[in-house]
Image (cartoon, rainbow, N blue to C red):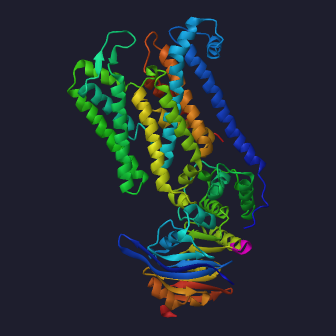
């Protein structure tokens, strides 16, 4: 598979403090990358640097042959969809909230194609019944689906998701991650998501980036997720086992086993 | 991505049509109140004759003179000022993401009042006259207007400068505005404490916002500023929708949030400054009209901005009309009536909740 996005030597500083240093990795079409690490190591900062919400001090983010960091913010938004951790509500229908994702493509006003794309995404995610529901009356899971749908109607090549399953119950977590997995494969895009749940990451991601002290500690596929790597990054001993053919991480249990 | 298999949903079209119907109803209401505002007063002119006079086919010179020389500029001023204050309010509430933001709460009106007080008390532009219609007058309204405008812009400049230094955060803008409002109010009190009776009366008179001060001379400036500002806000409606969804979402959608926020505040402040400087302090319109309209058309700025503009015009026209008849032959300042009429409607709408 060809590399879709390649990040090289990315560096971000905040008030003369290095937050990210020498970040480098690549992602292929149809892949989901999980960015993992403890709170405050720079996972969210990394996502925001990729679509220039934050301006990196050094480095490149090459999407095919273009450096995203050289593009206009609207041009970046036509290529990269971003789902932030916190989703604000207002007195808008889900359809209008998702239609907002067409902002980078809208001239003076929306055209029929914009509305049709929003409709297609609602069908794709099985959200037709929510179309005219007001987002300020929605549950956390529904709201997160709206946020993901909004990013999808941007027609992005890359999807960035900042902890897409935080504050969701187990069923909603699985639903959301399954949706992301399917959309990425069906539409030939790629997704980079920050996560805290290592088990969900193992189940739904293809490759993993562990961040420690603002640097990529380890980057690779499932085989890099080992008890020693997790202990190095999180400072917590774990055991990795298999349940029903799925690998799972059990925290704090390996000392005695 | 292959997303071209979708269709434009019929139920969504019907939902948008309902919003359009509310806006059309508002336009009809604004037209009715516009005619009524010209019709009602010390000399009552039948509405049909008002329409004939406006179309230039009236048979009465007397009514033509009243309509064209007195009532029409006042009614146009009410429409333009209503639109201006209301859209300044809706824009400020959106870009600052604060439901109590308005030209009044952000200190711009207080700065205008302070400017007028400086003009009257320090520069000596206020005098006392003894007429029933206007017991107090400003002897040099041009100087007072210019000084009031300068202070409105100073307040705006301070808010924008501090916000720019602190990264244009909404919280900094709102808190700076509240602090400035208190500062300028204290400044007015300080000047009033050292003023004589005539000066004190002139300052108080100026602060009573009143569309009755409008003349044909001042309308072009108001129309150009409010018209250009309205177009600016409508052109940015998608950016405001994006900011309503949160700064990070807006940034992810390619919106330059800092620029949109600073430019929007500047435009809203210039509109407010022009209206306050020309007509005095008219509170409540900018605060309450956006909330009234939200309850009918929701938060979508595509409908909220035009709907709020129309609501502002209706509220100020209705207030001005009632102000002229409620204690006739005396005419109340319109600012008193905007709150008297707007507050009960607003509270009713708050209780009633959103219209689905």
Examine the rendered structure and indicate whether residue A173 appears above or below residue B332. below
Residue A13 in sight:
yes
Q: Quadrant of residue B307?
A: top right
Residue shown at 62% from the left, 70% from the top: A159
User: Looking at the picture, how far across and down is residue B187, in whole percent?
Assistant: 26, 35
Q: From the viewer's perspective, is A79 left or right of A115?
A: left
- Magenta-highlighted residues: A184-188
Q: From the viewer's perspective, is B291 left or right of A119?
A: left
Examine the rendered structure and indicate whether residue B143 appears above or below residue B328. below
Our reading of the magenta stretch's main secondary structure is helix
B171 in the magenta segment: no
Residue shown at 47% from the left, 92% from the top: A255
Residue shown at 47% from the left, 37% from the top: B287
Which of the two residues, A97 or B309, is positioned nearer the viewer here? B309
Q: Quadrant of residue B345?
A: top right
Residue A163 in sight:
no
Q: Residue furthest bottom?
A: A257
Which of the two residues, A179 or B218, is positioned nearer the viewer here? B218
Q: From the viewer's perspective, is B99 left or right of A189?
A: left
Which quadrant is the C terminus of chain B positioned in? top right
Residue shown at 42% from the left, 81% from the top: A213
User: Looking at the picture, how far across and down is residue B83, in whole percent?
Assistant: 53, 33
């Amino acid at each position: 598979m060809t590399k879709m996005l390649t990040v090289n030597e990315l560096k971000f500083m905040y008030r003369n403090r290095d937050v990210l240093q020498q970040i480098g990795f690549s992602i292929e079409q149809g892949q989901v990358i999980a960015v993992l690490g403890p709170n405050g190591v720079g996972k969210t900062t990394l996502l925001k640097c990729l679509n220039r919400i934050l301006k990196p001090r050094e480095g490149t983010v090459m999407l095919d042959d273009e450096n995203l960091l050289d593009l206009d913010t609207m041009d970046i938004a036509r290529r990269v969809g971003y789902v932030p951790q916190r989703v604000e509500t207002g007195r808008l229908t889900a359809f209008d909230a998702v239609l907002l994702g067409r902002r980078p493509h809208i001239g003076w006003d929306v055209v029929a194609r914009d509305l049709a794309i929003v409709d297609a995404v609602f069908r794709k995610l099985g959200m037709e019944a929510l179309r005219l529901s007001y987002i300020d009356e929605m549950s956390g899971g529904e709201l997160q689906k709206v946020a993901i749908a909004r990013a999808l109607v941007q027609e992005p090549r890359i999807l960035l998701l900042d902890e897409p399953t935080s504050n969701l119950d187990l069923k909603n977590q699985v639903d959301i991650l399954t949706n992301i997995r399917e959309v990425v494969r069906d539409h030939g895009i790629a997704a980079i998501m920050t996560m805290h749940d290592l088990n969900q990451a193992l189940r739904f991601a293809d490759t993993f980036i562990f961040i420690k002290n603002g640097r990529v500690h380890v980057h690779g596929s499932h085989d890099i997720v080992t008890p020693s790597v997790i202990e190095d990054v999180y400072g917590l001993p774990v055991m990795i086992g298999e349940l029903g053919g799925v690998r799972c991480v059990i925290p704090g249990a390996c000392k005695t086993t | 991505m292959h997303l071209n298999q979708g269709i434009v949903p019929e139920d969504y079209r019907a939902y948008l049509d309902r919003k359009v119907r509310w806006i059309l109803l508002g336009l009809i209401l604004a037209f009715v109140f516009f005619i009524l505002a010209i019709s009602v007063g010390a000399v009552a002119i039948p509405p049909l004759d008002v329409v004939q006079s406006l179309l230039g086919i009236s048979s009465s010179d007397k009514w033509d003179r009243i309509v064209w020389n007195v009532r029409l500029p006042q009614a146009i001023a009410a429409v333009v000022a209503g639109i201006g204050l209301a859209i300044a309010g809706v824009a400020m509430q959106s870009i600052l993401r604060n439901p109590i933001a308005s030209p009044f709460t952000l200190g711009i009106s207080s700065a205008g009042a302070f400017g007028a007080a400086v003009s009257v008390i320090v520069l000596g532009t206020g005098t006392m006259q003894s007429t029933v219609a206007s017991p107090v007058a400003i002897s040099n309204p041009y100087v007072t207007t210019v000084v009031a405008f300068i202070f409105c812009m100073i307040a705006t400049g301070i808010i924008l400068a501090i916000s720019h230094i602190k990264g244009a955060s909404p919280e900094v803008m709102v808190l700076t505005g509240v602090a400035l409002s208190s500062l300028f109010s204290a400044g007015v009190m300080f000047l009033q404490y050292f003023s004589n009776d005539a000066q004190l009366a002139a300052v108080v008179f100026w602060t009573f916002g009143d569309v009755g001060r409008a003349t044909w001379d001042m309308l072009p400036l108001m129309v150009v500023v409010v018209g250009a500002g309205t177009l600016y806000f409508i052109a940015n409606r998608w950016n405001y929708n994006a900011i309503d969804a949160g700064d990070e979402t807006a940034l992810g959608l390619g919106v330059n949030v800092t620029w949109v926020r600073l430019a929007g505040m500047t435009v809203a402040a210039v509109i407010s400054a022009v209206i306050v400087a020309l007509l005095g302090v008219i509170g409540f319109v900018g605060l309450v009209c956006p909330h009234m309209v939200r309850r009918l058309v929701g938060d979508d700025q595509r409908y909220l901005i035009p709907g709020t503009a129309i609501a502002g015009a209706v509220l100020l026209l209705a207030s001005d009309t009632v102000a002229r008849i409620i204690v006739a032959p005396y005419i109340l300042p319109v600012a008193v009536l905007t709150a008297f009429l707007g507050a009960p409607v607003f509270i009713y709408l708050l209780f009633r909740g959103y219209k689905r």
